[in-house]
């Protein structure tokens, strides 16, 4: 008999949803999977699974929205937990919640084996406000949102197992939640991100939401001396005030912003580029590192966070100090050796970073 699994999520587009989708695709034909989505947007149906949509409608306005998240949403989760308790699920697989980080349902389904896939904590409560609350309004907002932090830490206590995405995340999450975490690395979809012989152009890429945490400002300012020759393309979207601030920093520099892009077009950009740059602060994993390498393009990242675990320093790219000229020099060195390093990138992905390899540790939760 197949294992019966409940998967609970309301993830928007992004790396978290990509990983969850790959997990579902891996196990949907060998497990009976029910997907429970507690969200305002109807989820896409996935073949060979059962999807149950619990439509919610958060209240408009900052204060009302936070009241809804802290007071109304838990009661919705409590009602839904009754269905899970009555169903004969072998385990419940839960991702972080779009509204409240760890979902409230964790504390209402104590009788089940619960695996909580946590990509990151509510970082604005544990890291510098310089990056997570750069504007005065952000600082005030975090004061009103503080109950979410308390609720998040309480919910996680009820998880049987926390699964995270890197050694870096494991270290952080274990300090915050005081629970042991297991690493299951994300992988890369080689049907989408793969090498192809195209002529490289004088392009430098930087992928991710436009904000202070991803710190495209750092990348622009650091690479400014070579932007007369190379075009820097930033792929990502952000709040209007973050984007405006970034555009003021860019000025007349040779930089282009692409707010939205299809994966097929993104993979083509990776192939054309000579290097992909990561300047983010405390990046939990850094999916762009894998995507870029899968397309045969080396990566330069600041020497911190999750990218340290996917880049082979000096082989598939470089890890650079944030201070001084080290980052710029290593970008130049990578550009000069991009073709040779690109071959090593492809080898790295094939050897270690396909979804088939990275998701194997989950077999013990999904298979009898």
Image (cartoon, rainbow, N blue to C red):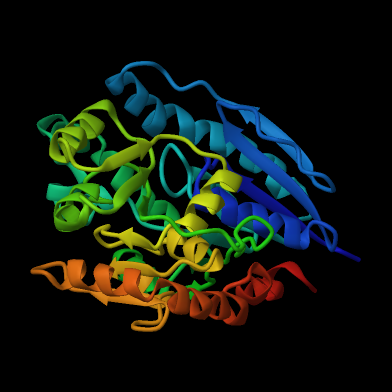
Q: Is residue 340 left or right of residue 81?
A: left
Q: Is residue 353 left or right of residue 322?
A: right
Residue under the point 28% across and 75% down: 333
Residue under the point 20% across and 29% down: 244
Quadrant in which the N terminus is drawn = bottom right
Image coords of residue 241 (percent x, y) = 21, 28
Q: Is residue 30 visible?
A: yes
- Above or below, 260 against 6 in this view is above
Residue under the point 84% across and 63% down: 30
Q: Is residue 19 left or right of residue 34?
A: left
The quadrant where residue 305 appears: bottom left
Depth order, front residue of 67/126: 126
Residue under the point 67% across and 59% down: 23
Depth order, front residue of 119/347: 347
* Residue furthest top as drawn: 60
Q: Is residue 174 visible?
A: no
Depth order, front residue of 10/175: 10
Image coords of residue 248 (percent x, y) = 14, 33
Quadrant in which the C terminus is drawn = bottom right
Image coords of residue 325 (percent x, y) = 11, 69
Q: Is residue 320 left or right of residue 204?
A: left
Marks counted in the figure total 0
- Above or below, 257 against 130 in this view is above
Image coords of residue 179 (percent x, y) = 40, 71
């Amino acid at each position: 008999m197949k294992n019966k699994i409940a998967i609970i999520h309301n993830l928007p587009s992004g790396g978290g949803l990509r990983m969850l989708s790959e997990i579902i695709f891996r196990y949907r034909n060998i497990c009976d999977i029910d997907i429970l989505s507690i969200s305002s947007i109807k989820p896409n149906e996935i073949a060979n699974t059962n999807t149950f949509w619990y439509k919610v409608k958060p209240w408009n306005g900052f204060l009302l929205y936070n009241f809804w998240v802290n007071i109304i949403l838990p009661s919705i989760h409590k009602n839904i937990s009754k269905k899970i308790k009555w169903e004969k699920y072998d385990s419940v697989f839960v991702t972080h919640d779009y509204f409240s980080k760890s979902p409230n349902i964790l504390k209402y389904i104590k009788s089940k084996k619960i695996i909580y896939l946590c990509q990151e904590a509510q970082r604005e409560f544990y890291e510098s406000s310089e990056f997570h609350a750069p504007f005065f309004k952000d600082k005030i907002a975090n004061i009103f949102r503080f109950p979410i932090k308390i609720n998040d830490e309480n919910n996680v206590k009820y998880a049987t197992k926390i699964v995270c995405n890197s050694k870096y995340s494991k270290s952080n999450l274990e300090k915050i939640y005081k629970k042991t975490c297991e690493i299951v690395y994300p992988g890369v979809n080689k049907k989408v991100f793969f090498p192809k012989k195209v002529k490289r152009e004088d392009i430098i890429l930087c992928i991710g939401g436009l904000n202070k945490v991803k710190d495209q400002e750092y990348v622009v300012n650091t690479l400014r001396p070579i932007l007369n020759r190379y075009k820097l393309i930033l792929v990502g979207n952000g709040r209007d005030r973050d984007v405006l601030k970034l555009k003021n920093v860019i000025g007349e520099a040779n930089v282009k912003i692409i707010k939205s892009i299809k994966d097929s077009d993104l993979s083509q950009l990776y192939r054309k580029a000579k290097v992909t740059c990561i300047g983010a602060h405390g990046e939990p994993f850094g999916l762009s590192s894998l995507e870029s390498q899968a397309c045969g393009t080396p990566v330069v990242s600041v020497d911190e966070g999750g990218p340290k675990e996917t880049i082979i320093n000096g082989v598939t790219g470089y890890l650079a100090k944030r201070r001084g000229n080290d980052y710029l020099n290593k970008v130049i060195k990578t550009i000069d050796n991009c073709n040779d390093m690109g071959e090593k990138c492809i080898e790295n992905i094939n050897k270690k970073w396909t979804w088939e390899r990275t998701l194997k540790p989950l077999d013990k939760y999904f298979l009898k």
